[in-house]
Image (cartoon, helix red, strand yellow):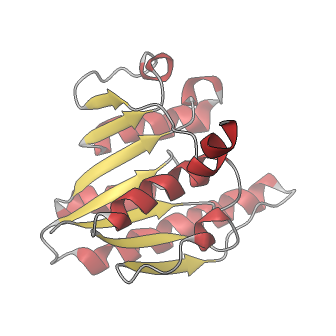
Amino acid sequence: MKHIVCFHLFNDYSGSPKVLKMVLQGILDKGYEVDLITSKGGVLDELTGHANLKRVSYGYHFSANPLITMSRYLGVQLYTFFIAFRYLFQKQTVFYINTLLPVGPALAGRMMGKKVIYHYHENAFVKGAFYKILATLMQKLAHKIICVSQYQRSFLGRKSGVCVIPNALPKEFTSRLH
């Protein structure tokens, strides 16, 4: 059975970790082994009660000073780059990179010959130069890119290995509509 190692930079209560929580809930319910590597203190902390889930957590938060935030970001990329090498000899391991930001483990995954899947939530081409660089790296490192809309996909130069899977609504929300 495949082993999925999921990397997510900032575990808060925004959209991308909420979507990731739903994705992981489905994967875990199907019996896959999942390692989740993310920061502490958000919606992903609610994933409990699964014997097939292992967590590696680190401290990460933003600062009012952009240089401090960038140094923390680079530190986490270095940390997760090296953490990724724990999986060097595990043949059936897939790296699932949630958002553009975890580029360190994506690079490590490619270096080890792992399948690297990106779940691309943000539109890098309206966010500035840093995100455009990350989007370029994603297109080079990913075996597969999951976009959340056709609009978002249209900004990518890469056409093969790209699919669109719109975000779903949580069951807790849709059950209240009836």
The residue drawn where x is 51% and y is 46% is 99
Quadrant position of the C terminus in the picture: top right
Quadrant position of the N terminus in the picture: bottom left
- The vertical placement of 56 against 147, above or below, is below
Q: Position of residue 113 (x, y in %)?
A: 16, 59
Q: Position of residue 117 (x, y in %)?
A: 31, 48
Report the number of discs: 0
Name the image quarter holding residue 41: bottom right
Judged left or right of residue 111, residue 65 is right
Q: Nearer the viewer, residue 57 or 113?
A: 57
Q: Nearer the viewer, residue 100 or 47?
A: 47
Name the image quarter holding residue 92: bottom left
Judged left or right of residue 41, residue 5 is left
Q: Position of residue 125 (x, y in %)?
A: 56, 24
- The vertical placement of 73 against 177, above or below, is below
The residue drawn where x is 28% and y is 52% is 116
The residue drawn where x is 69% and y is 60% is 12
The residue drawn where x is 15% and y is 78% is 89
Q: Nearer the viewer, residue 100 or 79?
A: 100
Which residue is situated farthest in the bottom direction here? Answer: 51
